[in-house]
Image (tube, rainbow, N blue to C red):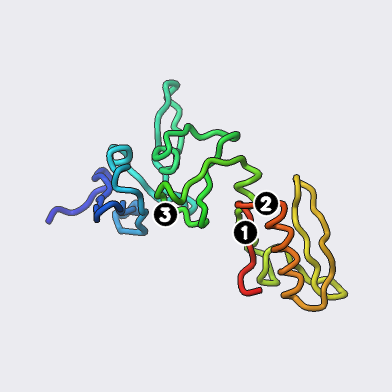
Amino acid sequence: MKKRTIRNPNEIIINGDVAEIVLYDKDCKEVARTIIDAEDVAKVKKYKWYLAKGYVVTNLYRANQKRQSVGIQHVILGITPNRKHMIDHRNRNPLINRKYNLRVCSNENKCRNSGKPKNNTSGFKGVSVNGKGWQSRIKINRKEVHLGTFKDITDAARAYNIAALKHHGEFACLNKGV
């Protein structure tokens, strides 16, 4: 068996209506796999895919010879990356690039579907501790709205969920277990 080099194309494994693309690091070691619909293999097989900041991307060269990283989701949906039309992963997993998991949206809606921040200490999105208990807040139209202060953390998380469903609709990222 020949040794893999960085010039080799990604291995693509097709199983029924699903395909897996094997992603490698610079040392040609497998680091992850992305899942796409088998019908999209023809669109993506001519590119070399890799993982960058958790997303599956390739480098494209435009007419002006500038390199641009493009996500696999853009190639699959046939949309040029721009600030007005972003592509959101419904389940927030950027390795699942099947069409059912992708949707075109605004940057604001993409942010609504984000999980809790890494520096979160409460364990719930939109909930933080304050001197009187647990404070619940949500961003609505780029403004932070105070939802209340609660003695119980799960009440604060529930308040966030109710507001998120009302204001964020299908893009609401809800707290689980409340």
Q: Position of residue 21 (x, y in %)?
A: 31, 51
First in residue order: circle 1 vs circle 3: 3
Q: Residue furthest bottom?
A: 152
| Disc 1 to disc 2: CB gap under 8 Å | yes
Dot 2, crowdedness within 10 Å: few (<14), some or many (≥20)?
Answer: some
Q: Residue furthest top?
A: 63
Residue at image coords 55%, 33%: 82
Position of the N terminus by quadrant: bottom left
Q: Position of residue 74 (x, y in %)?
A: 45, 39
Residue at image coords 53%, 40%: 104
2 vs 3, front mark: 2
Up-down relation of residue 34 to residue 133 (above or below): above
Dot 1, crowdedness within 10 Å: few (<14), some or many (≥20)?
Answer: many
Secondary element at image label 1 = loop
Residue tagged by mark 3?
Answer: 96
Secondary element at image label 2 = helix
The residue under label 3 is which amino acid type?
Ile
First in residue order: circle 1 vs circle 2: 2
C-alpha separation, residue under disc 2 versus residue under disc 3:
23 Å
Residue tagged by mark 2?
Answer: 168
**Nearer to me, 124 or 5:** 124
First in residue order: circle 2 vs circle 3: 3
The residue under label 1 is which amino acid type?
Cys
Residue at image coords 72%, 52%: 167
Residue at image coords 45%, 28%: 66
